[in-house]
Each structure stands twice: as structure tokens, then as C-alpha cells.
Image: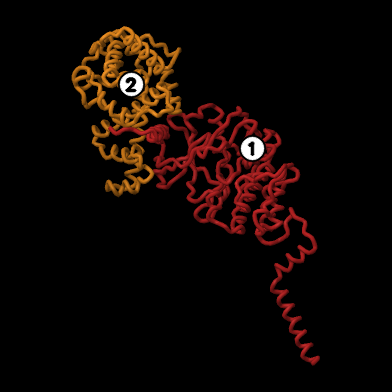
Chain colours: A red, B orange
């Protein structure tokens, strides 16, 4: 038998940790990603002959809270039937009592990978608007994501946008079923993702540091609502505009996106900063409002986040009516030429 | 690793190992009055620990090849004869820690007394492949930042996984599934695993990708089962087994 190197030993340890799907209709193919609470595997659905992604509770996360959170995550996603949210197919328990749920396997890129490939700000903004729409849908169903970040957003191979990882979602009180309107009381426990960054923490602090709203960062869980997601969306927008994953701070405020280049308009910067406002009341009231402003931004209409001066209004009008202006100018020029010729 | 004798001069007794495998907790066996049960339990312990103990003595006690062989053989023979392990209390320490303490005490006493080590004892029918262990030690010396204790733990883990891989090999061969093991070996054991894909394996072995998927899934399942069985063999109580599984693999077992 060959010597098993340290790296192979670690690999075999992971192999031994792989879930046993033998009692299910799934056949494990490989590990896709791992996080603090669960690991996502690519598997084959033997009955329907299709690939699925299966999230399995990590073997180390055996406490009741993790178990409950995982099950709850599946339930949260199941109630969010939207093209921008990955559908759950199935929920079950493995022979070792670990919870799993199967969902659609999305082929594509994470938003951070997409940003590396797509330079056009307009295109990025259109994708961002789709993200806002999916989050707005969740908000309308009483669900706050609480961990929005580029790593939790997928751009599918047909350009579709999907918001993933609803593991720390909060169900707000607006929902019909009061039993669901309860934030989990979970002990303070820190997790690390496969990438090694400090991410979702449970209890007082929930979210990912760079994308976390001030109320989340301060552990004011009772203040966390859809505007907290709006803040995270603002940071994502900052990233899409500047390629800067963590907005650098100068004093108590963030560095202005326009400092990264004149291609970033004042309007885009204003939308970004309004979403990222320190105080919740200064932000967009919902992801829907943000989405609408982004839509206006993409279409070249005035945005609610920015009050234009008369000159800017004129410039915008001119920019949108170039043909008309050209026509009028041509006409005037022709009249001048005619007047000049007849005067001679 | 124990099947090929490369140094008959210093092996204990004759070739081969006659003990059947057991999945019962070792403590039941070593405390048993039934000599056969005791021997089986002891064989399981020996299987898991002799090599880490040998390497540990080489490193911690700075013993040369021959001395380390003698100490290892004599230690296990003495442990078997005097039934050291029956005194182990899993509430006080992990078995690895207990075993290391026993080894340290044994080697210290032997050196102090400058006694000539006695070979054989109750284990004269067990062959330990020290030659191979020595080659491993020469080719893969301990990392400088590892303490002898950490090295022992690491080698014990490596030995456990190696035994599980060997057992998987044997089982696949016995059930006419040699291809399954070859696929497992190529995909999970080769250091160049990143360049091996299901598709490339399917081409290489003339199989469909689905068949490769099924073989690998079955091999991994079996590997996990064997590994847990080996771990159970090497532990002294259900509680210790669960603790070890949690520490070693991060998993909960029933």
C-alpha cells in the first residue's frame, strides 16, 4: 500500500465525512462548497436522471439549533417560489440523523466571478436589479435574507440571477403564521467558510462583516429588517460599480465610488450611498424601492436618491433627445444659411 | 503493511497474522477471560498502534532502528502478557494518551535497568513489518514543528486510514470488484487528483461516467464503514469511540 500523504489524509477525512445517500434516490457525485453549517454536494437523482445540489448539515453541527436552522432554511426557501430563488425539491434525514435538502443545481458563476468577466456597468446594474427583485419578493413574503453578498448570488448560464443561502434568514412578524415569525434564539457561535473569511455568526451578530448593516454589526437583532438587506445590497452595488469588495472608509464615511472613475455617475453614487446609509430611516424602505431606482438609473431617468440641478436636468433632457436637438439645430443652421444667402 | 516481512531477523515469530477481525470494543476483549477473545482484541489494538508506537520510540526516545524494534516488540508482548490495557480507564484519558504514557514508562524503565529486552512473549505468531515502517520514516520524516506526541497522533491517524484503505482493497478484491478499488485509488488516493475526472476515468477504464459515479459512491460508503469499524476496534468504549469519531472525523456516530 502506498504512503498516504498529509494532504491525501485530509482528503480521505473529507471522503469519510461524505454523507451516506444509499437510502435515498440520490447518488453523490462530488462536494461543491462547504460552509459553517452545511456542505453542498452535487448529486444525481436516480429516478429523474438529473443533477441536483444537496445541502447536508455538517457532521460537526449536531446541536439542535443547527438541525432546526437547516430544516427552517429549507422551509423558508420552499415558500419563496420565485425565478430568482433556487427551488427546493426535497427534504430528508440521512441514516446518521443529518438533515439534507435537495435543490436545483445551478450552473453558472458567482457574482464575484461574474464581475471579473463582465466590465460593463450597465450590464452589471441589470443583474443587480434582478437581485433586488428576488430580495424584494422575499421581503414581500416576510423573509429577510440577512447574509446578502456576492458569494451568495449566482448568475446562471442563461443569465438568470439566483439568490442563495437563506440559512440565516429572519422571518419577520408580518407573515400570516405567527409560529414562523420568530427569530431563532441561537447561541453566539462563529463559523468559518471554506474561503476562510469570518462569516455568518448566529445569535447577536448575524451576517458577513463587509456586507453587514450597522444594526447587524452591533448585534441589534430586533432592529434587523428589510432595510438591513437594503444596506447589504448597497454594498454589493458599491462592489459592482467600483470592483471593490469591501468599501474602504475614510473617517466615518465610505470612499466615494466616483473616485474610482468618471464613468460612475453622480446618480449611481447617490443610489449606492442611499442604500448604504448608516441610519435605517435614511435608506430605501425596501429592496423594491431600490430596484425601482436602479431601473431608472439603467433607463437614464432621474433617480429618487439624487436631486438634479437645472443644468443637469437640461443635460439629461439633451442626452435623451439628441435626435430632436440635432434636427432643430440642423433646421436652425439651414435657416441661418438661407438668411445669410438671401441677405447677400 | 504488516503482511510483507522484510526483516525476518527482528520480526516477532512467524509470518502472517491469524487473528480474525473484530468490531467489538477492545476493552471487552482485553478484559475477557476467554484467551481467544483476548487475543483478537489485542490483535486489533496491535494493528492500529504498533507502527505509530515504533515511530514514536524512534523519534521521542531517539532510539536506533534495532532498539526501536526491540522496544516495540517487547512492549506489546509485555502488555499482552501482563494485560496492561485492562487497567485503562477511558474516563481519565484518551487511549492514545494512555498508551503513550505506558510506552514512555516502559522504555524509561528498560533503559534505566539496561535489561536485555525479551522478545516473543504472547505474540510470537504476529509479524510486524518494521522494515516498511523504517522506509516510511526515512522517506517521510516528521515535520520539524511537530512534537513527538503530535507526531504519534498523526501517525496513528495515518495508520488507521491506511488500514481502512487496505481493508477496502481486500474487500473489493474478494467480491470481484477490483475495478471499484482501482477507481477509488486513482480518484481519492493519487496526489494528482485534481487532474483526474470521472470522465477521464470512464475513458481509461472503458466504463460509462455513470458507472464510475456508482463505483466511487459505493467505494466511499464502504470506506467510511470500514474506517469506523477500525476506529471501533481501536477504542475501548462506545463513549470513547464516539469521542474519537468526533475528534478524528468530526462526525457523530450512534
Say few, some or many: other residues with alpha carbon within 10 Å of mark 1 (under 14 / 14 to 19 / 20 or more).
many
| Residue B3: x %, y % from top left | 23, 26
Q: Nearer the viewer, residue A254 or A301?
A: A254
- In which image quadrant can residue A18 be found? top left
Label 1, label 2: how far apart the Cα atoms are: 60 Å
List the residue tagged with mark 1.
A171
Q: Is residue A106 left or right of residue B18?
A: right
Disc 1 to disc 2: CB gap under 8 Å? no
- In which image quadrant can residue A337 be found? bottom right
Tell me the quadrant of the picture where the N terminus of chain A can be found: top left
Task: Name the subunit of mark 1.
Answer: A
| Residue B226: x %, y % from top left | 34, 28
Tell me if residue A320 comes above or below residue A332 in the rendering.
above
| Residue A40: x %, y % from top left | 48, 40
Disc 2, SS: helix
Labelled disc at residue B58: 2
Tell me if residue A23 comes above or below residue B160 in the rendering.
below
Amino acid at each position: 500500500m502506498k504512503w498516504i500523504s498529509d494532504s491525501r489524509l485530509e482528503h480521505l477525512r473529507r471522503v469519510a465525512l461524505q454523507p451516506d445517500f444509499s437510502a435515498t434516490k440520490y447518488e453523490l457525485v462530488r462536494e461543491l462548497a462547504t460552509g459553517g453549517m452545511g456542505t453542498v454536494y452535487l448529486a444525481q437523482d436516480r429516478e429523474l436522471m438529473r443533477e441536483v445540489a444537496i445541502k447536508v448539515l455538517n457532521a460537526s453541527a449536531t446541536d439542535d439549533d443547527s438541525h432546526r436552522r437547516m430544516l427552517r432554511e429549507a422551509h423558508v426557501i420552499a415558500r419563496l417560489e420565485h425565478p430568482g430563488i433556487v427551488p427546493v425539491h426535497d427534504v430528508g434525514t440521512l441514516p446518521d440523523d443529518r438533515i439534507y435538502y435537495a435543490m436545483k443545481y445551478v450552473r453558472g458563476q458567482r457574482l464575484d466571478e461574474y464581475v471579473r468577466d463582465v466590465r460593463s456597468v450597465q450590464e452589471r446594474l441589470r443583474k443587480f436589479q434582478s437581485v433586488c427583485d428576488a430580495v424584494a419578493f422575499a421581503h414581500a413574503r416576510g423573509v429577510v435574507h440577512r447574509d446578502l453578498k456576492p458569494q451568495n448570488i449566482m448568475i446562471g448560464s442563461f443569465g438568470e440571477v439566483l439568490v442563495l443561502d437563506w440559512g440565516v434568514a429572519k422571518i419577520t412578524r408580518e407573515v400570516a403564521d405567527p409560529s414562523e415569525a420568530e427569530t431563532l434564539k441561537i447561541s453566539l457561535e462563529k463559523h468559518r467558510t471554506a474561503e476562510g473569511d469570518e462569516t455568518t455568526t448566529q445569535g447577536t451578530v448575524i451576517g458577513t462583516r463587509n456586507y453587514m448593516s450597522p444594526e447587524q454589526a452591533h448585534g441589534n437583532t430586533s432592529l434587523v429588517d428589510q432595510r438591513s438587506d437594503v444596506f447589504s445590497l448597497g454594498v454589493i452595488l458599491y462592489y459592482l460599480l467600483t470592483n471593490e469588495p469591501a468599501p474602504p472608509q475614510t473617517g466615518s464615511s465610505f470612499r466615494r465610488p466616483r473616485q474610482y472613475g468618471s464613468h460612475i455617475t453622480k446618480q449611481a453614487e447617490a443610489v449606492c450611498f442611499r442604500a448604504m446609509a448608516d441610519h435605517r430611516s435614511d435608506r430605501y424602505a425596501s429592496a423594491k424601492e431600490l430596484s425601482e431606482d436602479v431601473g431608472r438609473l439603467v433607463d437614464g431617468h432621474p433617480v429618487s436618491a439624487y436631486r438634479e440641478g437645472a443644468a443637469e436636468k437640461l443635460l439629461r433632457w439633451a442626452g435623451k433627445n439628441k435626435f430632436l436637438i440635432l434636427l432643430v439645430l440642423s433646421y436652425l443652421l439651414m435657416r441661418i444659411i438661407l438668411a445669410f444667402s438671401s441677405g447677400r | 503493511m504488516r503482511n510483507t516481512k522484510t526483516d525476518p531477523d527482528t520480526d516477532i515469530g512467524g509470518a502472517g497474522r491469524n487473528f480474525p477481525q473484530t468490531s467489538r470494543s477492545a476493552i471487552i476483549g482485553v478484559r475477557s477471560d476467554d484467551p481467544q477473545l483476548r487475543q483478537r482484541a489485542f490483535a486489533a489494538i496491535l494493528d492500529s498502534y504498533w507502527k505509530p508506537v515504533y515511530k514514536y520510540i524512534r523519534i521521542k526516545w531517539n532510539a536506533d532502528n534495532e532498539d526501536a524494534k526491540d522496544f516495540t516488540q517487547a512492549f506489546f508482548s509485555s502488555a499482552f502478557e501482563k494485560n496492561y490495557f485492562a487497567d485503562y480507564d477511558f474516563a481519565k484519558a484518551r487511549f492514545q494518551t494512555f498508551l503513550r504514557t505506558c510506552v514512555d514508562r516502559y522504555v524509561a524503565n528498560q533503559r534505566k535497568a539496561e535489561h536485555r529486552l525479551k522478545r516473543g512473549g504472547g505474540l510470537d505468531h504476529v509479524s510486524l513489518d518494521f522494515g516498511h515502517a523504517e522506509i516510511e520514516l526515512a522517506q517521510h520524516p516528521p515535520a520539524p514543528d511537530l512534537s513527538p506526541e503530535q507526531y504519534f497522533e498523526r501517525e496513528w491517524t495515518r495508520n488507521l486510514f491506511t488500514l481502512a484503505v487496505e481493508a477496502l482493497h481486500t474487500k473489493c478484491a474478494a467480491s470481484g470488484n477490483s475495478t471499484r478499488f482501482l477507481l477509488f485509488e486513482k480518484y481519492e488516493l493519487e496526489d494528482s487528483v485534481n487532474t483526474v475526472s470521472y470522465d477521464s476515468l470512464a475513458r481509461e477504464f472503458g466504463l460509462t461516467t455513470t458507472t464510475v459515479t456508482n463505483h466511487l459512491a459505493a467505494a466511499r460508503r464502504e470506506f467510511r464503514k470500514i474506517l469506523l469499524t477500525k476506529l471501533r476496534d481501536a477504542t475501548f468504549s462506545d463513549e470513547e469511540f464516539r469521542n474519537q469519531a468526533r475528534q478524528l472525523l468530526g462526525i457523530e456516530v450512534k
